[in-house]
């Protein structure tokens, strides 16, 4: 037999072929796939035979939308729903724990199955008309280049498959990216058309991110410890900055270009020398903040994406300049940590061994309590014992985590 060529008006015909166990090559936004009924073991066996694909390699299933996850998996991870909402239809295959209804041959004897919703109108129409998940690896003999046109499919399989839907040339020419959510950390099993950082940014944007800010001696360290006890990834922006002054070639180069010789022979940033140059010059201080905020933010975003790929759901960022750096935009809530002036002075003196005059000068040079009450989601006052403040933090942060994020954050915010 010769392979039938089906165009836009004949999708019902293609659905009929699929339902009776036939094979139809279908267009996607990446490459053409070789599709058959994913619930029909005989159709699946024929896909393996036509491609010459080893049966130890599992197949993924094309589905019409995210609702198919309930049918094809035993349980649907929260992360899967978020990724589907963001990237489906599109070049992302998501692996989860397979439902018993999926033939063992599709799973190659394993316990998981990948799902993919292709971004091509003809194939989406086929999936809707079939009402079936379709086993659909790329439409090429194993080891050969994946086809981007119906003509290339016919060069491989004319007479060996029932039909090909001619949907024009595929635009991306790369297979879908494959991620497994069947365990943590999540893993990219194949890097395809969708970059990994786009995926991890979506997951990071779904996390509950608590911001902490406030002046010296207020007790932000105690607040951060409470969040760590609640399972949060805790990031100290000042520590990130100090690390980057040693490790970030880009930041070091920009600082040197703008401010000259500010690094000692051993590579350490000479902070006093840099401070002397910027604190009396508002333009220089703005330039310094622009450079450091850029690199610190990028590193914070990288850590959040990495944590999200490990299955993390809660993070905290401690930053004195959280609003100036724009970090507040990614936070679910920002807590200002306040304390009476005298207590702050005493804490700074005890911690750093400095004079009362120097500690008081530092406190008085920082922002007022009124500023934090005006800009923060809420403020916590540290005026009692460490234990009392820690308990207040635990209660407030537990409630904030329970409430989660009010609005869906764009993934671009974490790139």
Image (cartoon, rainbow, N blue to C red):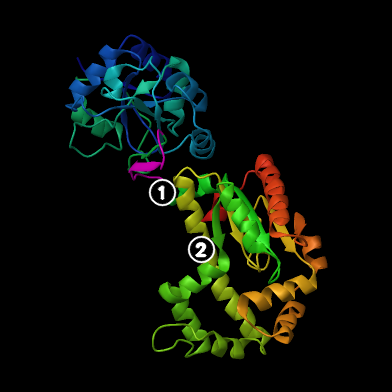
**In the displayed structure, would residue 415 be above or below residue 45?**
below
Looking at this view, is 317 or 88 the one in front? 317
What element does badge 1 sit on? helix
Does residue 330 sit above or below 50 in this rendering?
below
Percent of width and height locating residue 246? 43, 76
Disc 1 and disc 2 in contact, CB within 8 angstroms: no
Query: Would you say the magenta stretch is mainly helix, strand or loop?
Result: loop
Residue 137, image x, y percentages: 29, 29
What residue would you read off at disc 2? 298
Residue 196, label in figure: 1
Sequence-wise, the earlier of marks 1 and 2 is 1
Magenta highlight on residue 192: yes
The answer, for residue 6, to whether it is visible in the render is yes
Query: Would you identify the image quadrant in which residue 107 lies?
Result: top left
Residue at 62% in and 74% down: 351
Q: Nearer the viewer, residue 1 or 229?
A: 229
x and y percentages locating residue 414 in the rendered image: 54, 54
């Amino acid at each position: 037999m010769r392979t039938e060529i089906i165009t836009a008006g004949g999708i019902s015909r293609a659905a009929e072929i699929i339902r009776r166990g036939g094979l139809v090559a279908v267009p996607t936004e990446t490459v053409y796939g070789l599709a058959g009924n994913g619930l029909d073991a005989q159709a699946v066996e024929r896909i393996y035979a036509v491609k010459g694909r080893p049966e130890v390699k599992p197949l993924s299933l094309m589905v019409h939308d995210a609702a198919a996850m309930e049918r094809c998996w035993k349980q649907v991870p929260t992360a899967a729903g978020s990724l589907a909402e963001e990237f489906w239809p599109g070049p992302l295959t998501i692996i989860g724990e397979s439902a018993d209804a999926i033939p063992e041959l599709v799973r190659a004897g394993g316990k998981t199955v990948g799902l993919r919703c292709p971004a091509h109108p003809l194939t989406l129409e086929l999936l809707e008309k079939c009402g079936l998940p379709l086993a659909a690896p790329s439409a090429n003999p194993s080891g050969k280049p994946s086809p981007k046109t119906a003509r290339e499919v016919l060069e491989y399989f004319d007479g060996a498959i029932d039909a090909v839907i001619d949907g024009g040339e595929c635009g991306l020419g790369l297979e879908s990216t494959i991620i497994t959510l069947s365990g943590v950390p999540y893993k990219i099993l194949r890097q395809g058309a969708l970059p990994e950082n786009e995926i991890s940014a979506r997951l990071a944007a779904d996390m509950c991110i608590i911001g902490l800010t406030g002046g010296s001696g207020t007790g932000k360290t105690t607040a951060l410890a409470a969040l760590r006890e609640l399972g949060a990834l805790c990031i100290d922006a000042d520590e990130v900055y100090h690390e980057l002054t040693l490790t970030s070639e880009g930041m070091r180069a920009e600082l040197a270009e703008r401010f000259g010789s500010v690094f000692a022979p051993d590579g350490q940033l000479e902070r006093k020398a840099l401070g002397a140059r910027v604190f009396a010059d508002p333009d220089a201080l703005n330039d310094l903040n622009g450079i450091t905020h850029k690199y610190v933010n990028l590193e914070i975003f990288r850590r959040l994406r990495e944590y999200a790929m490990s299955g993390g759901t809660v993070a905290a960022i401690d930053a004195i300049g959280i609003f100036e750096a724009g970090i507040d935009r990614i936070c679910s809530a920002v807590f200002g940590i306040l304390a009476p002036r005298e207590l702050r002075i005493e804490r700074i003196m005890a911690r750093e061994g400095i004079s009362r005059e120097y500690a008081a000068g530092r406190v008085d040079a920082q922002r007022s309590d009124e500023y934090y009450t005006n800009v923060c989601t809420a403020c916590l006052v540290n005026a009692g014992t460490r234990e009392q403040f820690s308990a207040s933090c635990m209660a407030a942060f537990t409630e904030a985590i329970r409430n989660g994020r009010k609005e869906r954050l764009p993934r671009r915010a974490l790139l």
